[in-house]
Image (cartoon, rainbow, N blue to C red):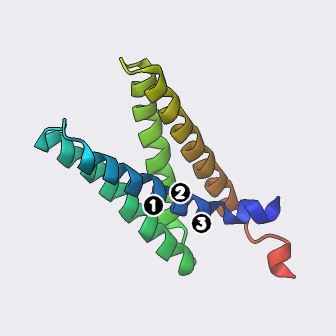
Amino acid sequence: MTRLLSLMPWILTSWTVFLWLSRLRNVLGADDLTSTGRAWRIGVVVVFVVLAVVAAAGMIRRTMVPLMVLIVWTVSYWLVRGTGILLGDWSVGFKVVHTVLMVVSLGLAIGAWIASWSGPSESATR
């Protein structure tokens, strides 16, 4: 369990890149978006992917500040956007899919937060 916890920051950054590059594909393929709507959505994708890449680079350099920024951004985004989706006029399927994405993202962000404050695991010091 300690090993899994120590991997949470890496799992969060990987998940973030995977999720948001998948979102980019969806945005680029959506013919019903206006150019402004498309630009905003691409902007959100860019922010998430850049934060994840910078967080990964920070972890390699053993600085956790970029990871903390990614965690705070992830939690903030999903609390605002997820609430909007749940309370909005969306289909049940859309709400279910986005609720799952939100729960996974929030869970990984919380796991990464805990891992970043727990210090090196016992197995890492042996």
Give above or below for 74 relative to 95: below
Closer-to-camera residue (33/64): 33
Contact check, label 1 and label 2, Cβ < 8 Å: yes
Q: Which residue was labeled with disc 3?
A: 10
Query: Can you tell which of label 1 and label 3 is closer to the viewer?
Result: 1
Q: Which label number is shown at residue 57?
A: none
Q: CA distance from mark 1 to mark 2?
A: 6 Å
* Amino acid bearing label 1: Val
Closer-to-camera residue (20/72): 20
Looking at the image, is mark 3 or mark 2 earlier in the sequence?
Answer: 3
Question: Where does residue 118 sit, x and y in percent of width and height?
Answer: 73, 61
Q: CA distance from mark 1 to mark 3?
A: 11 Å
Judging from the image, what secondary structure is the residue with disc 3 in? helix
Give above or below for 73 relative to 102: below
Quadrant in the picture for residue 7: bottom right
For this view, does 47 lie left or right of residue 103? Answer: left
Question: Where does residue 2 sit, x and y in percent of width and height?
Answer: 81, 62
Looking at the image, is mark 1 or mark 3 earlier in the sequence?
Answer: 3
Q: Which residue was labeled with disc 1?
A: 17
Q: CA distance from mark 3 to mark 2?
A: 8 Å
Q: Which residue was labeled with disc 2?
A: 15
Residue drawn at 43 percent across, 49 percent down: 73
Give above or below for 15 relative to 6: above
Question: Where does residue 26 sit, x and y in percent of width and height?
Answer: 32, 47
Residue drawn at 24 percent across, 42 percent down: 30
